[in-house]
């Protein structure tokens, strides 16, 4: 699984960072979250799906 963030949509509320900090890091300078990994480790896939479901503007894009 790969994941990326659409920066035209991200509103920087940090929810993904709280749900899965291993994959999403908050960029304090840009007020956005960033993806830390190229490939999501298998044991974190469900957390990443949860983060995507909870992302209000739908900015988290999962590619299976
Ligand atoms: S949950 Fe969505 S809107 Fe919030 S910081 Fe993460 S990607 Fe951005």
Image (spheres, rainbow, N blue to C red):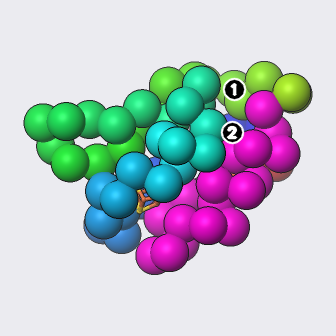
Q: Residue at x 40, y 50 (%)?
A: 14
Q: Residue at x 48, y 54 (%)?
A: 15
**Residue 40: horizontal and vertical position, in percent?**
72, 30
Range shown magenta? 44-61
In the rendered structure, find residue 7 and report the number of the disc placed on it: none
Q: Name the secondary structure under disc 1.
A: loop
Instruction: Read off the residue under disc 2.
Output: 2
* Quarter the N terminus occupies: top right
Residue 7 in sight from this viewpoint: no
**Residue 48: horizontal and vertical position, in percent?**
70, 46
Magenta-span inclusion, residue 46: yes
The answer to whether the residues at label 1 and label 2 have Cβ atoms under 8 Å apart is yes
Q: Residue at x 53, y 49 (%)?
A: 16
**Residue 5: horizontal and vertical position, in percent?**
46, 52
Q: Which residue is the extreme one toward the left?
A: 29
In the rendered structure, find residue 39 and report the number of the disc placed on it: 1
Q: Name the secondary structure under disc 2.
A: strand
């Amino acid at each position: 699984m790969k994941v990326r963030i659409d920066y035209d949509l991200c509103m920087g509320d940090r929810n993904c960072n709280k749900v899965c900090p291993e994959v999403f890091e908050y960029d304090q300078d840009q007020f956005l979250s960033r993806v830390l990994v190229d490939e999501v480790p298998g044991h974190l896939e469900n957390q990443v799906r949860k983060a995507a479901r909870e992302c209000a503007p739908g900015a988290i894009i999962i590619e299976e």
